[in-house]
Amino acid sequence: MIGELGPKARAAAKALREASAETRTAAIRCMAAQIRARAGAILAANAGDVAAATRLVDRLRLDPARLEGIAAGVDQIAGLPDPVGAEMARWRRPNGLDIARVRTPIGVIGMIFESRPNVAADAAAIALRSGNALILRSGADALASARAIGEAISAGLAEAGLPEAAVQIVPIPDRDAVGAMLAGLDGAIDLIIPRGGKSLVARVEAEARVPVLSHLEGICHTYVHEAADPDMALEIVLNGKMRRTSVCGATETLLIDRAALPMLPAIADALRAAGCALRGDDEARAVSQMASTTEADWTTEYLEPILSVRTVAGLDKAIAHIALYGSSHTEAIVTGDSAAAARFLAEVDSAIVLHNASTQFADGGEFGFGAEIGIATGRLHARGPVGPEQLTTFKYQVRGTGQVRP
Amino acid sequence: MIGELGPKARAAAKALREASAETRTAAIRCMAAQIRARAGAILAANAGDVAAATRLVDRLRLDPARLEGIAAGVDQIAGLPDPVGAEMARWRRPNGLDIARVRTPIGVIGMIFESRPNVAADAAAIALRSGNALILRSGADALASARAIGEAISAGLAEAGLPEAAVQIVPIPDRDAVGAMLAGLDGAIDLIIPRGGKSLVARVEAEARVPVLSHLEGICHTYVHEAADPDMALEIVLNGKMRRTSVCGATETLLIDRAALPMLPAIADALRAAGCALRGDDEARAVSQMASTTEADWTTEYLEPILSVRTVAGLDKAIAHIALYGSSHTEAIVTGDSAAAARFLAEVDSAIVLHNASTQFADGGEFGFGAEIGIATGRLHARGPVGPEQLTTFKYQVRGTGQVRP
């Protein structure tokens, strides 16, 4: 069953690669229109999923306003620049050869998600924008919703003259399907992107036999340096932790410089007033009352209104703490000292490093990518937000006039 | 034993990342000087390897001139631009955030090679140039030579104030060492690059649990279109096949357009005069005497003076043949028709596509990269020649003035 998806996706990928940007744009717009036109069917399918669900029901539930939000998101992706064919670099060699590095689609992307049906539409639009075919495997909870959205997407593709199989939903709630996708579907999948909870991502990272773009967790740090402006430090820590505590870019540990400890009481008061529980080391607890930390706090992604606080003796110790306990996702320094900021930005080896800004900016939309399919913390191909451009590879086009190699 | 290499490499990678470009340059120059200074010890170790070897002895053998060539190659890499810290892109967001995408080293590269001792020195210099630590596993045949070169490299590193463990040679001819490296040495290896015969590369691609940059084979095509200049077609086919038949960019199949068949006799005569054996399909054999082909010829990387010839009915059939039988390495079209060339360059989905130039230009040096550690035919991270720049990743440096996310 699932074996049929691979060759169809491969054939569709060829058609997508050779289609014009205008055709891909039209297809994305048709997908949005079909989602709107089929709202009744999608909401009915979703009602069935919701009735059967026993957990995470709110993530699963669609209503007319949420569905319109999904369609609007797809339309917005239609308006993004098309990366395919863009020249990344071009140069001429002394022998006259003209060499261009040109963006091309990756090919077929396998995406494995859990219970948010909006992921199906977002991922389809981003994959189309970058010329890639997509095989989507929904969690069983959301499968009827995903299939209904998938039908709308295929109808939109067909309307624009592209293969319906450019986006395929694995039609069965088969756990073995995940294994087959992680093995690459006999060479049909070029890249896997998991989107869901930590156990899903951990399984994908451990078992995949094809490249993966993912992040397992975001243990993000904000470091308040001794030369920080106290008000700015308070605002950045408060926002980094509390704007939304459930996102991967939320600050989980505050590193407070020993010399900045006098700023901690006001920061801690503001966090508590916003509903945040604090856990600190002895030096932090000496200036502001809070629970004590254990070693486990430094490696915990709370995703809740909890913040761990560690006192560090200077920039080097802050960088060393992040290297030891961080997840290479996103870290910020607050300081008025430009030399300290430059060292932090250079030496902290995370996908995103910020100076005087909130870790909650770790987001493709905030980076100006228009949309993202996820954030990657691996070191190959893409790091940080993964938008349409990051879903391309490149090739070299070499133009000659008869050159042969001596 | 091999377990100790990982943590040492990881620590060295941090030092390399934080070293200045000048320090890395000095270290590469010191490596070259130490190779020259230790020529006696290296040649003595190599003589031992050669005496014990039963196969591929010429690849293994060093002499003073070859060793000087190795040292000169290292010196040349010292003169290449340092990619680390280069800004790939920088932009400002409406909220004032200044976002830069900056090159950083990948980290620790594991390289597995067979019997060419020069690979150890080349790879060490390229890894250093890109700020990466290296763990090198030599084939048993070349191990004494590799260890002697490794000692020179470590001495050069130490002289420049960098950790000796920035380049480590696996000291034992243990086949299990390859397995441990392919598993990533407990997270210490970020990328594996195999360099050797097809069975080695196939094993690495099948078993590696970390990203791999490699090419299994180069089944490269030259397509002579009906609008080709006959003399240019002859020169490009002859050079593409015969300049060096053992390189991965050598043409293995000539696709001759049916309308270009009148050009084939002269091309075939020139190839035969240069010592090339020809195998053709019926239409090719009707215009020039040659052996006949079987299906296996289209998927064979000869690496010898043998060329298969297939007659195709136009551009689409040429592109379809390459898609079906090619290895996504390097393909060329010879034509005076710019529309046909544009379609070939756009639609052939290989790492390198050339118009009116020899496939033998598939080489990092010829691309102006200065040096290459290999050629990649995968679709993620890097395709085509892998030089110092391709051995980097990137991170985002975000500079703010107190921005928080609404």
Image: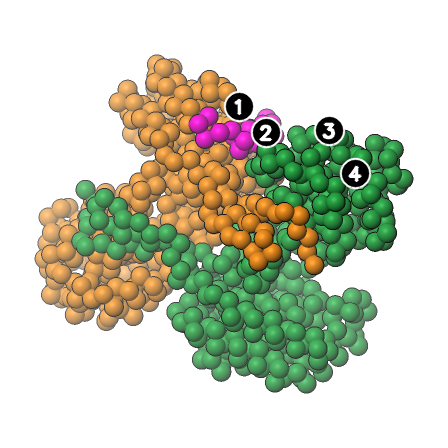
Chain colours: A green, B orange
The residue under the point 66% across, 70% down is A118
Give the numbered dot on residue B163: 1
Counting from the top left corner in percent of width and height, residue B104 is at 51, 40
Counting from the top left corner in percent of width and height, residue A47 is at 75, 79
Q: Amino acid at mark 3?
A: Ala
Q: CA distance from mark 2 to mark 4?
A: 34 Å
> Is circle 1 on the same chain as circle 3?
no
Magenta-colored span? B1-23
The answer to the question of whether label 3 and label 2 lie on touching residues, with beta carbons closer than 8 A, is no
Q: CA distance from mark 4 to mark 3?
A: 15 Å
Tell me the SS state at disc 2. Answer: helix
Q: Which part of the image, by quadrant, shows the C terminus of chain A?
A: top left
Tell me the SS state at disc 1. Answer: loop
The residue under the point 56% across, 74% down is A75
Looking at the image, tell me whether mark 1 or mark 2 is earlier in sequence order. 2
Q: Amino acid at mark 4?
A: Met
Asked whether residue A249 is in view, the answer is no
Q: Is A220 situated left or right of B133 in this image? A: right
- Disc 2 packing (10 Å; few <14; some 14–19; many ≥20): some
> Which chain is home to disc 3?
A
